[in-house]
Image: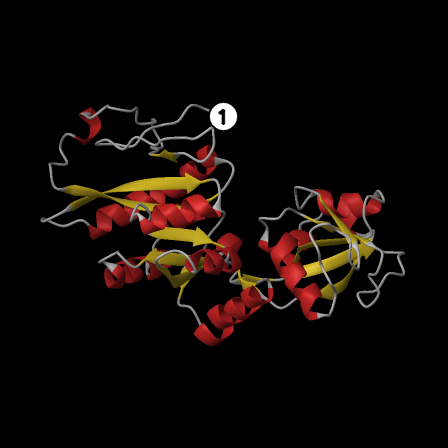
Amino acid sequence: MKLYIILGIIGIVIVSGMIGYQSLYSDNNAVENNDTENISTVGSDYEFFTIGTIHRDSAKMVKRYQPLADYIAEKISDENKVFMGKVSILPNPEKMIESINNHEMDLYFDSPLIGIKIMQDADIEPFLLSWKEGHREYHTVFITPIDSEITFDNLFNKTLVFEDMESTSGYFLPVIHLQNAGYSIDLDGTDDFSFVFSKDDENTPIWILEGRGDVGTTSNLDFEDIPTNIKERVKIIESTKSLPRQMVFVGNHVEQKDALKEILLDMDNHPSTLEILGKISDTSKFSEINWDEDFKISEKLMELLE
């Protein structure tokens, strides 16, 4: 179903169960469409400052990101212009590209591989690193049952368990690593090995223990969170290079880039703003991008997928 998003003086809350919507959210109440009472004091000269990402669960993501959107909007507002924070959660890269190019997305949060892929068609640039779940970077590990004799050098005719085709650590990064190691990968599964999708990183180790696959891929962070009774039954046979945990991209139409960077880099210095960050998957801080170690590596890895 094609979903049309109506923009009025305030955002709109979409009927529960539909995805890919744009919405405004308040910790106290959802703002209903055409209800202008709550913003009547804003005046006529205001703009939305919109942040967002790609995700299936729009309601959950809006809850997480809205406090940050509100904080940014308040900090960049002045006597000449008032900004209102808005969160836009979109269902796929195509919608994100469209939103960015229409100047409807100001800050975009995603894994570096997905973000760099989108950047090829969208008018954005890498801006900062986001320490998601308190980690600056992560990598993929390949796991097998602990008594398996499978090695990374001999995956031929085996079945690999990926998470899903939108996952960096559960699909993109291991695919890149496999290609770089000389394996041939075809989406039809007719080349060196076959593969299946577990749909959740928690399912992956269980699937290989149940015999639904021979080798699983998951992030090193998710591996550490595997319950002990399962973790002690699997082992790591290979690891990929590390990537930044999450990258923040900014639209080239945004005029307040310098002020915005200063605001975000300062957030980990104050308890009140640390609480705002913590709502977004336990984000602990923002930091500058190391172009040689972060963006350039991500860009090089992205080229291997094309």
**On-image quarter of the C terminus:** bottom right
Can residue 257 be seen here? The reply is yes
Residue for point 71% across, 48% down:
226
Rendered image quadrant of residue 184: bottom right
On the picture, is 98 further left or further right than 173? Answer: left
- Say left or right for 263 vs 167: left
Let me know if residue 229 appears in the view: no
Reply above or below: 228 against 298.
above
For the point 50% across and 42% down, the residue is 55
Q: Give whichever of 249, 237 is nearer the camera.
A: 249
Binning the other alpha carbons within 10 Å of mark 1 as few (below 14), some (14 to 19) or many (20 upward) gives few
Residue 173 position in % (x across, y down): 62, 60
Q: Nearer the viewer, residue 221 or 127?
A: 127
Q: Residue at x 36, y 27 (%)?
A: 13
Foreground residue among 205 and 14: 14
Rendering coords of residue 172 (x, y %): 61, 57
Query: What residue is at 39 percent from the left and 62 percent from the top?
Result: 128
Q: Is residue 115 above or below residue 93?
A: below
Q: Is 219 on the left or on the right of 87, as rendered?
A: right
* Quadrant in the picture for residue 217: bottom right
260, 101: nearer the viewer: 101
Q: Secondary structure at mark 1?
A: loop
Residue under label 1: 17
Q: How many marks do you count on the picture? A: 1
Residue 155 rendering spot, x and y as whole percentages = 82, 61
Above or below — where is 276 with respect to 265?
above
- Which amino acid is tagged 1? Gly
Q: Position of residue 54 (x, y in %)?
A: 47, 45
**In the image, farthest residue toward the bottom:** 292
Tell me how the rendering is colored: secondary structure
